[in-house]
Image: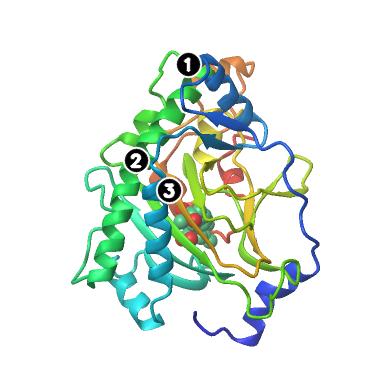
């Protein structure tokens, strides 16, 4: 990982050091996609979770455990490479000047820092590959990319299922209102593989606490996360307190993003979350961010405005506009307030 100046390291270490560990989330909402129960119950459970925490766990997803294990092993192998190798692979993964590629400790381009290294890849439906390759990829990076491609295809299918349930649960006439945005051939999605190495001084659980990825909401429609069995993810509850999410490597976790909060006129909650590093074991997570096409005009759905007594909480904007505005902000900022109607 890159070496930081002393002041920069303190930014990661100090604010977290004074915080005590967040209590575990007692009631992680769960949605079983396995078809065990009635579809209408699954749709209701999705809506209740999105209105509540803006966060839920997906079980019965049908993604083969073998694929998840391969992704996890390939990610671990990628981050075990040397710094120059990772940087070279990241450079293959992206065009110059884009936010994509390999990064270490620096998040975005506005000065945010975290105890994390990552690979960030653009994903389009036209090319399910999470990147258009620029130049020659090393054989180990090519095989990692192939596994991620396989992963993207199955995770996107699961996301579509979840988005259909949301529309059904909300009683929308337009049942494809959300799924259409995520499965369009120009949908602007991303894949992020994060590695949170244990801090060298953390020999045992609870020995210290660093900010891995600072608090934020995700700008997209929804994000789907899968991690190894190391803890770290925390979500912010409605009362402003934080709760840690017990890891579950067999399941996926879904976050409502800013765009879905807008489309539902604020009924669904874009959940604030962060990752704290306190474990002596590394955490590896893979997150698929499902975004709409850049030109898509986004506004609260008329039916949900009617249900809200005619109050329209956000003005219309395009995803291109929102993304540009989001990329000018620091991680922890509220990005939606610039698009509120009053
Ligand atoms: C948060 C969600 C995704 O990880 C991400 C992040 C992006 C980045 O790392 O480049 C941003 C952040 C995220 C929101 C505000 C801006 C942009 C870092 C940052 C400070 C890939 C995304 O889409 O938005």
Residue 171 seen in the figure: no
Is the C-beta separation of discs 1 and 3 under 8 Å? no
**Marks 2, 3: nearer the viewer:** 2
Q: Is residue 245 above or below residue 98?
A: above
Name the N-terminal-most of marks 2 and 3.
2
Q: Position of residue 52 (x, y in %)?
A: 67, 32
CA distance for labels 1 and 2? 26 Å
Residue at 37% across / 56% down in the picture?
Answer: 70
* Mark 3 secondary-structure assignment: strand
Q: How would you rate the neighbour count of disc 1 (Cα within 10 Å): few for under 14, some for 14-19, many for 20 or more?
A: some
> At 54% across and 22% down in the image, what residue appears?
42
Q: Is residue 79 left or right of residue 186?
A: right
Residue occupied by mark 2:
154
- Front label number (1 vs 3): 3
According to the image, label 1 marks what residue?
172
Q: Secondary structure at mark 1?
A: loop
Residue that label 3 marks: 288
Q: Is residue 218 visible?
A: yes
173 or 18: nearer the viewer: 18
Task: Mark 1 and ligand 1: say if the CB distance to the nearest ligand atom is below 8 Å.
Answer: no
Q: Position of residue 229 (x, y in %)?
A: 57, 55
């Amino acid at each position: 990982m890159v070496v930081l100046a002393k002041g920069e390291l303190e930014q990661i270490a100090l604010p977290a050091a004074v915080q005590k560990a967040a209590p575990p989330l007692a009631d992680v909402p769960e949605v079983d996609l396995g078809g065990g129960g009635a579809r209408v119950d699954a749709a209701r459970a999705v809506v209740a979770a999105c209105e509540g925490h803006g966060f839920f766990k997906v079980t019965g997803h049908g993604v083969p455990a073998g694929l998840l294990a391969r992704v996890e092993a390939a990610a671990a192998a990628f981050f075990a490479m040397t710094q120059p190798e990772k940087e070279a692979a990241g450079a293959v993964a992206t065009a110059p000047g884009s936010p994509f590629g390999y990064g270490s400790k620096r998040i975005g381009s506005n000065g945010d820092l975290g105890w994390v290294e990552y690979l960030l890849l653009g994903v389009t439906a036209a090319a399910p590959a999470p990147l258009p390759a620029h130049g020659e990829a090393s054989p180990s990076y090519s095989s990692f990319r192939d596994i991620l491609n396989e992963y993207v295809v199955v995770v996107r299918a699961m996301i579509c299922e979840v988005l259909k349930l949301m529309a059904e649960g909300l009683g929308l006439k337009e049942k494809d209102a959300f799924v259409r945005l995520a499965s369009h051939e120009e949908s602007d999605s991303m894949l992020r593989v994060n590695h949170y190495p244990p801090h060298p001084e953390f020999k045992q659980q609870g020995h210290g606490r660093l900010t891995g990825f600072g608090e934020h909401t995700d700008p997209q429609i929804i994000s789907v996360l899968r991690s190894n069995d190391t803890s770290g993810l925390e979500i912010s509850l409605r009362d402003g307190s934080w709760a840690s999410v017990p890891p579950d490597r067999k399941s996926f976790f879904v976050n409502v993003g800013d765009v879905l909060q807008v489309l539902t006129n604020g009924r669904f909650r874009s959940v604030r979350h962060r990752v704290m590093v306190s474990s002596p074991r590394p955490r590896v997570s893979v997150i698929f961010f499902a975004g709409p096409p850049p030109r898509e005009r986004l506004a609260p759905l008329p039916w949900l405005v009617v249900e809200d007594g005619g109050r329209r909480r956000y003005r219309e904007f395009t995803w291109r506009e929102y993304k540009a505005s989001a990329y000018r902000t620091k991680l922890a900022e509220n990005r939606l307030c610039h698009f509120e109607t009053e």
